[in-house]
Amino acid sequence: MKVTELAKAKINLTLDILGKRDDGYHEVEMIMQSIDLTDQMVFTLTDEPKITIECDVSYVPTDERNLAYKAAKLLQQKFAVDKGVHIVLNKKIPVSAGLAGGSSNAAATLRGLNQLWQLNVTIDELAELGSEVGSDVPFCVYGGTAIARGRGEKIERITKAPPMTILLAKPQISVSTAVAYQNFSMDKILKKPDTKAVISAIQNQDPQAICHHLGNVLETATFAMHPEVEKLKEQMKSFGADGVLMSGSGPTVYGIVLKEKRAMRIFNALRGFCNEVFLVRTV
Ligand SMILES: C[C@](O)(CO)[C@H](O)COP(=O)(O)OP(=O)(O)OC[C@H]1O[C@@H](n2ccc(N)nc2=O)[C@H](O)[C@@H]1O
Ligand SMILES: Nc1ncnc2c1ncn2[C@@H]1O[C@H](COP(=O)(O)OP(=O)(O)OP(=O)(O)O)[C@@H](O)[C@H]1O
């Protein structure tokens, strides 16, 4: 028996940090949005209770360090499952990019194994379990448009954002999420995102207003470590993207482009100096 799931990447329309918590994490408020950049995952049932992963990208770990493995192990233990799974992971989402690639693989594993192992767990329960794997996993279980609070695991689903064309550019560097949060400092915030204004813009299905109010307080921390990310943001703006922001802890920078025709031109301009460029849409 086989089950196939698509794991969608996310971008942060806003990322605000409200304070540091006693558990070492940061209290956040973020508007998250799924995009149609997806990894494909095929889950095959095995009689042996082993979890095995094969992946077409050599530098993604296929052992217990893989977030999909962690999610599978968690379900197997929690529900005393005596079967196993072989997971084939076809990666399209760039790794360590700020696009929640690993988290969305973990979320797709929870959804896929719920079917494969016939667990009948609700989507809310899957999201709650996902928070044990990582802060971005609960959002990825649901997908769509949502506000994430707490350390990112408390999800409030909201009206879907209007369809938007988005360019993603990932420089050839990786950013550790933990290091970006460590380097964040409240008094270095340049511009707080206006979360409420973005929520209203989503409710009003107004892409222009969404572009106007985007904001991510982790930009300062990542830009200080990697000035090329800030430069990329400036370039994307100068090429004519309507709203430009770093996603998550970076280094991917995205640009919302309101006129479809202009998107292709900016895509080609970015390809001139950045080899990981994607043209995607909100889902
Ligand atoms: C940057 C974002 O991707 C934005 O969506 C998320 O906040 C990060 O989510 P994630 O990658 O699932 O993060 P986790 O795997 O839970 O945490 C990685 C590390 O980031 C830091 N971390 C993460 C989330 C949070 N609210 N505060 C933190 O300080 C912690 O040092 C943690 O050890
Ligand atoms: N299934 C997976 N896919 C990609 N990377 C994974 C996976 N499982 C574990 N990893 C490891 O996780 C680390 C972060 O990769 P990932 O692509 O999830 O980062 P990210 O997009 O920045 O995540 P986030 O936006 O949630 O912070 C990498 O070091 C990678 O080796």
Image: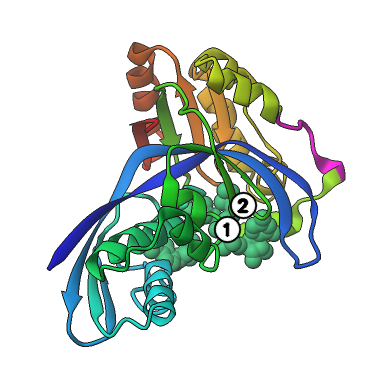
Q: Position of residue 168 (x, y in %)?
A: 43, 35
The CB of the residue at mark 1 lies under 8 Å from ligand 1: yes
Residue drawn at x 76%, y 51% is 184
Bounds of the magenta segment: 187-193
Residue drawn at x 40%, y 30% is 282
Q: Position of residue 41 (x, y in %)?
A: 25, 59
User: Do the numbered discs 1 and 2 sit on residues whose CB atoms are within 8 Å?
Assistant: yes
Task: Find out whether residue 189 is within the magenta segment.
Answer: yes
In this rendering, position of residue 213 left or right of residue 138: right
Residue 178's quadrant in the figure? bottom right
Helix or strand or loop: what does disc 1 sit on? loop
In this rendering, position of residue 235 left or right of residue 79: right
Label whose residue precedes the other's in the sequence (1 or 2): 1
Is 250 drawn above or below residue 43 in the view shown?
above
Neighbor class of circle 1 (other Cα within 10 Å; few <14, some 14-19, many 20+) is: many
Q: CA distance from mark 1 to mark 2?
A: 5 Å
The CB of the residue at mark 2 lies under 8 Å from ligand 1: yes
Q: Which residue is mark 1?
A: 135
**Three-letter amino acid code at the position of disc 1:** Ser
Quarter of the image that includes the C terminus: top left
